[in-house]
Image (cartoon, grey):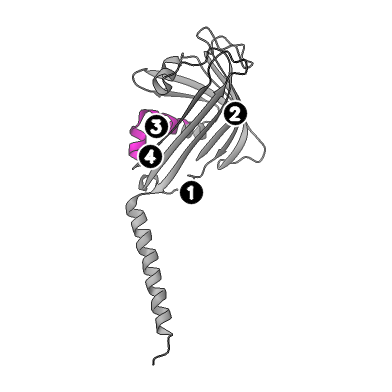
Amino acid sequence: MVLDITGGCFSYGAAGATGCGNTDSSKLEYATGSFTFNNTLSGISNPATYAYLASVSLHATDPNNVTAPFNDTRSKSFATLGDLQSDPLWNTAYTFVNAVLANPAGSFTATLPPLGPLTASWNYTADPGSTPAHATGSLTAWSSNDLNGLAQLLFNQALPASPVNFSLNVTLSAIPEPATIALIGLGILGMGTIQRRKVSATLPVC
């Protein structure tokens, strides 16, 4: 599963995020951008039998050079889906993506200790021809909560004081668990043995 946001603009303000074209002072965080979404996990019939590798890369630049760049790249592997869902950060992202798929224009509430409930809202417009497995379009996201404490917790950095341009890449890959990989390997080994037997059976007897 891959989500790319490009051409993004993010604005933050404790008294209202008035940048990036936003004029609603009740929105303390506001973001716009273009997105590309590929759901490579849609064909998985039993997600619990897979391990997972998650990664995120966030790059933000201040066009006016007023604040320092805001950049973060990280990844983490999980032996099971349960491990992923028990991780506060990655389960928040995982739940968010699933919520977007289930309710494209709605609200999402996540609890990330020790900050308590945080609410974010979004809507997007998909381009013609988009499908649940592959979609492109534009989006707007915002929050009426002050998420600066969340930024400090996750990135050890305050949210930028002036509007920034940003790009975001989020990837979640499913990997068959070791037992499944071992079974696949045994199957390939068995196929090789059968093939060798067929070849030896056709050799002339001296």
Label 1, secondary structure: give it. Answer: loop
In the picture, residue 149 is in which quadrant?
A: top left
- Residue at which label 1 appears: 43
Label 4, secondary structure: give it. Answer: strand
Q: What's the distance in space between the residues labelled 2 and 3, CA to CA?
A: 22 Å
**Residue found at x 40% / y 42%:** 52
Q: What's the distance in space between the residues labelled 1 and 4, CA to CA?
A: 21 Å
Whether residues under marks 1 and 2 lie with C-beta atoms below 8 angstroms apart, the answer is no
Q: Main secondary structure of the magenta part?
A: helix
Q: Which mark is residue 91?
A: 3
* Few, some or many residues within 10 Å of mark 2 (<14, 14–19, 20+): some
Label 2, secondary structure: give it. Answer: strand
Label 3, secondary structure: give it. Answer: helix
Place of residue 188 in the rendered image (x, y in percent of width and height, measured from the top left): 39, 64
Q: Which mark is residue 124?
A: 2
Tell whether 137 sits left or right of 120: right
